[in-house]
Amino acid sequence: MPRYSREFKETIVQKMMPPNAQSIAQIHRDTGVSEPTLYNWRNQYKNKGKAVPADPSNPENRSAQDKLAVVIETASLNEQALSEYCRKKGL
């Protein structure tokens, strides 16, 4: 079983997040990392409270956990920073 560096893992998870929001299948085809591994990485980031969309093709269908993660991440932001965050994350 291959081992991946933390930097590589973070780069791949960033591809799952907006504005890129690539599907796990696409990332698997591009990198060769197995789909179960990619799902595991995504779930690890979600469990840490990071907002990683489950389905980038339908951003309105976010889980309550994803919505809470966004609220927690943005709680201390002012209006301008919140707008920038939303644009960056595709919200």
Image (tube, helix red, strand yellow):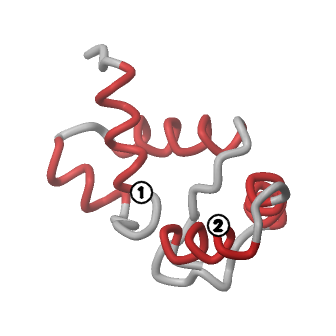
Residue at point 64%, 66% (across, down): 81
**Which quadrant is home to the N terminus?**
top left
**Crowding at label 2, few (<14), some or many (≥20) Cα neighbours within 10 Å?**
few
Q: Is residue 77 above or below residue 86?
A: above
Residue 16's disc number:
1
**Left or right: 77, with 54 as reference point:** right
In front of the other: label 1 or label 2? 2
Give how far across and how far down residue 27 sits, in percent: 26, 53
- Rendered position, 59 above or below 42: below
Secondary structure under the numbered disc 2 in the rendered image: helix
The kind of residue on which mark 2 rests is: Ala
Name the residue: 53% across, 45% down.
Answer: 42
> Which sits in the foreground, 70 or 1?
70
Identify which residue is drawn at 84% across, 58% down.
75
Q: Judge the density around disc 1: few (<14), some (14-19), many (≥20) Cα neighbours within 10 Å.
A: many
Q: Position of residue 9 (x, y in %)?
A: 37, 31
Percent x, y of residue 64: 83, 66
Residue situated in front as seen by the camera: 74 or 55: 74
The C terminus lies in quadrant? bottom right
Give the mark nearer the N terminus: 1 vs 2: 1
Q: With 6 as the anchor, is 69 left or right in this view?
A: right
Left or right, 39 with reference to 66: left
> Helix or strand or loop: what does disc 1 sit on?
helix
Indicate the amino acid at tag 1: Met
Is residue 74 depicted above or below 49 in this figure? below
Q: What mark, if any, has residue 81 been given in the picture?
A: 2
Tag on residue 2? none
Q: Calculate the distance from the C-alpha at mark 1 to the C-alpha at mark 2.
A: 22 Å
Q: In the figure, residue 66 lies in which quadrant?
A: bottom right
Looking at the rendering, which quadrant does residue 59 occupy?
bottom right
